[in-house]
Amino acid sequence: MSKKLLLKNDHVPYINKLSVYREHGGYSVLEKTLKNTSPENVLEEVKKSGLRGRGGAGFPTGLKWSFLARPEGVPRYLVCNADESEPGTFKDRYLMERIPHLLVEGMILSSFALGANTSYIYIRGEYFYVARILEQAIEEAYAAGLLGKNILGSGFNHDCYVQVGAGAYICGEETALLESLEGKRGNPRIKPPFPAVAGLYGCPTVVNNVETIAAIVPIIEMGGEEYAKIGVGKSTGTKLISASGHINNPGVYEIELGVPVEEFIYSAQYCGGIRGGRKLKAVVAGGSSVPILPTELILKTANGEPRLMSYESLGDGGFATGTMLGSGGFIVMDEDTSIVKNLYTFARFYHHESCGQCSPCREGTGWMEKILHKILEGHGTLKDIDLLWDIQSKIEGKTICPLGEAAAWPVAAAIRHFRSEFEDYVTNPESIKDIKHYYRLQN
Amino acid sequence: MPLVTIDDIPVEVPEGTTILEAARMIGGDIVPPAMCYYSKLKTSGGYCRTCIVKVEQGSAKDPRPMPKPVASCRTTVMDGMVVRNITSPENLEARAGVVEMLLINHPLDCPVCDQAGECHLQDLGYEHGKEETRFEFPRREFEPIDIGENIKLHMNRCILCYRCVKVADQITDGRCHGVVNRGEAAEISTYIEKAIDNDFSGNVIDVCPVGALTDRTFRFKSRVWYTKPVDAHRDCAKCCGKVRLWNQGEEVLRVTARKDKWGEVEDTADGSTAWICNECRFDKKHINDWTIEGPSKIDRHSVISANHYETTLRNIKADTIKMMGSKPHGDKVTLGTGALDPNNIH
Ligand SMILES: Cc1cc2nc3c(=O)[nH]c(=O)nc-3n(C[C@H](O)[C@H](O)[C@H](O)COP(=O)(O)O)c2cc1C
Ligand code: SF4
Ligand code: SF4
Ligand code: FES
């Protein structure tokens, strides 16, 4: 069973146009809200919904909003994080490309709740064509009186702007994003203060992911309580999953949180099984930063319970045997995949994307990449594997922003669960070179 | 006033004090090393991570420990906070990790570096580092560049502490000095190699904890431990005119600001920071330009004050060899007394 809240109209032709979006009920939630509801009520519904941030960390959205400082005479901002640069994650792009008005409606609704008269959508540079789609949607919304002064006669004023980044993963970290938005170098800020107190231009700011903001529309439409009935436990609602890798049907799926991982991989409704009927080897369940899990641990928890697509179930067992839902970038690897090669690709990415502010991440990411390259080339030693382990432990938890962890966790998890494969590379490099399949990931 | 306990020593400090400043009030071995924090520069600190400590108890109100080590220079104390620095083996291990990271790409060219003897990275390596490097790859390399007539930038030695950037931002006007590029490729630069042309730009040299920014008028004139530091002043229209001269006999080899025991530029009597202007620093190299006050008291327990210059030198060499491990780093560094001869430097 799949319940669709965000992508229910994604295949309607021209749904990116305001007229078609409205024909399908678009902006009716906003209209009703502005007419009949107070900002406090919207916040209350969001709290009741149990919605958790879809950008990766899963922080409860209602709680985040209630932290927003509200000093007199100081503007507040809503910033939408559309930087989406985590390898394996492409759900926000799909949503913005297909149904830009859902995000715009969500932006206005959320801003109304937060009392923000200005909002920004910060979108990654490589999505320039998506930025154009958003800009057209915003233009249409202004023309229809859905943005600007006195929206639909409610007295609420709101302006929404799209800002294109320059293609840096680190600008997805919320404070680096704010720096970049202010026109500065995209370095994460040292916290505290948190954006809720001093964010954009030093003013109280909420930063939310695209999917989080879009989800506000169905939440207000159906009511927080109804929304909270969807899903399982504290994982309420639906979630967009970007499925990629060695599966028959890669793509973006909206799932009800709590679908068993096995069903998600093998059912024809979702990934449709492993390509070519091969065996599953491993899954990175929530974008490149989260720990990789081998087949036995991704399908079932260490206690033998079926693993579900939810924050709690994927996290079950901590990092020893579990992982994270993260941003929902679900990367599937079949039996022919080289874990070492894959890890090298990830390590290269984090090395390239480190902003360089703090020593452990600036230096450590490059060091790990170099050692992995050495191992891949067949020059590694057993000591190198221990060294890799040690380096990741020296980065984790000692940096300014979580990119350090994002770089360390994949290394730790790959060694934790696939140590023997690293040892193969080291002790028998020639045999590995002969095995074509270890290189398939590259082709 | 909040009461904080650091390594079992309680201290009461004013509201808003950072853990690092509280530790400095206690003094001694429990003070975390700080490579990027500089009390005289706003928003400094947080970058290098050498000052990390373990917070065992957040506060009296909320006694939970903090989940990760924190940068003591950027974390304010709470009443009832319990902090462990040198009494936590785990913390020392974490710090050794940070120190190792700072050294893996460092050229270890101490024998030819003007900062040798007063370099905070050297001190840090001795006190908190490990015996040998585990890094076996070619080190990152940049070409040295001149930032104007008087300042040399050796990016190879830079630890990206951002202090010079804060100086450029906060005490010079018309800033054109900052960080370009990202991650490991990040470098300190002036806007398109523009010379910094500003009365106070020379202070970037004094805040640099390593030999990345050095005084071109002093380059290779002498090793710092062969010079004699004296405090002196002159009437200067631009700055406080209170300086430290580094002399050899009657010759003034170098002029710097006066530094306190934390290696930071001292305060003047009125409480402002005794930054000095470029005229005092670069142009007043005659002993008659100055009124000598007397020999400088050097508080810092660094190698310059140790007075064992020869031992120090020997240590630097031994350490360099050690740190270079089995792979001597190219032929750039000549290890031997010859290295001290400017003619021997490539
Ligand atoms: C290195 C790094 C990259 C990130 N990239 C993104 C991103 O592309 N999109 C996003 O929504 N959140 C990203 N985040 C998380 C944001 O910092 C922030 O937590 C999120 O935007 C909050 O929104 P949410 O509460 O709606 O999830 C990133 C975090 C880090 C540390
Ligand atoms: S952890 Fe990495 S990306 Fe984050 S601030 Fe430090 S150097 Fe920059
Ligand atoms: S040049 Fe010196 S002061 Fe500037 S960032 Fe590098 S180490 Fe710090
Ligand atoms: S001195 Fe605190 S992080 Fe550098």
Image (tube, rainbow, N blue to C red):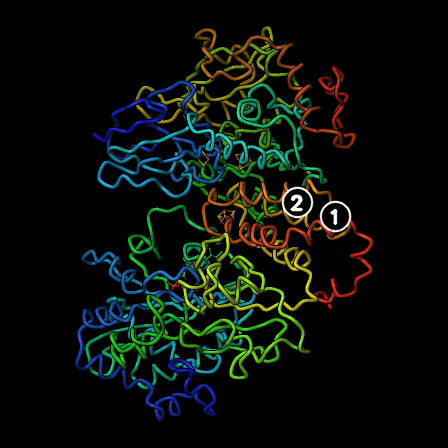
Above or below — where is B19 with respect to A106?
above
For label 2, the SS is helix
Q: Position of residue A78 (x, y in %)?
A: 33, 65
The reply to whether the C-beta atoms of the residues labelled 1 and 2 are less than 8 Å apart is yes
Which residue lies at the image location 26% right of the left edge and 27% below the top edge?
B13
Look at the picture and state if B337 lies above or below A18.
Answer: above
| Crowd around label 2: few <14 · some 14–19 · many ≥20 (10 Å) | some
Q: x and y percent of residue B300 in the render?
A: 47, 17
Report helix, strand or loop for mark 1. Answer: helix
Q: Nearer the viewer, residue B118 or A397?
A: A397
Q: In this rendering, does residue B110 appear at all?
A: yes
Mark 1 closeness class: few <14, some 14–19, many ≥20 residues within 10 Å: many
| Nearer to me, A126 or A28 | A28
What residue is disc 1 on?
Answer: A426
- Quarter occupied by residue B88: top left
- Residue where numbered disc 2 is placed: A385
Residue A92 seen from this side:
no
Left or right of B165 on screen, residue A431: right
* Left or right: B43 in relation to B221: left
Question: Callout 1: residue from which chain?
Answer: A
Q: Does B334 appear above or below B74?
A: above
Q: For the C terminus of chain B, which image quadrant? A: top right
Q: Name the residue: 45% across, 69% down.
A: A309
**Is the CB atom of the residue marked by disc 2 within 8 angstroms of ligand 2's nearest atom?**
no
Mark 1 or 2, nearer chain start:
2
Horizontally, is B164 left or right of B17 in the view?
Answer: right
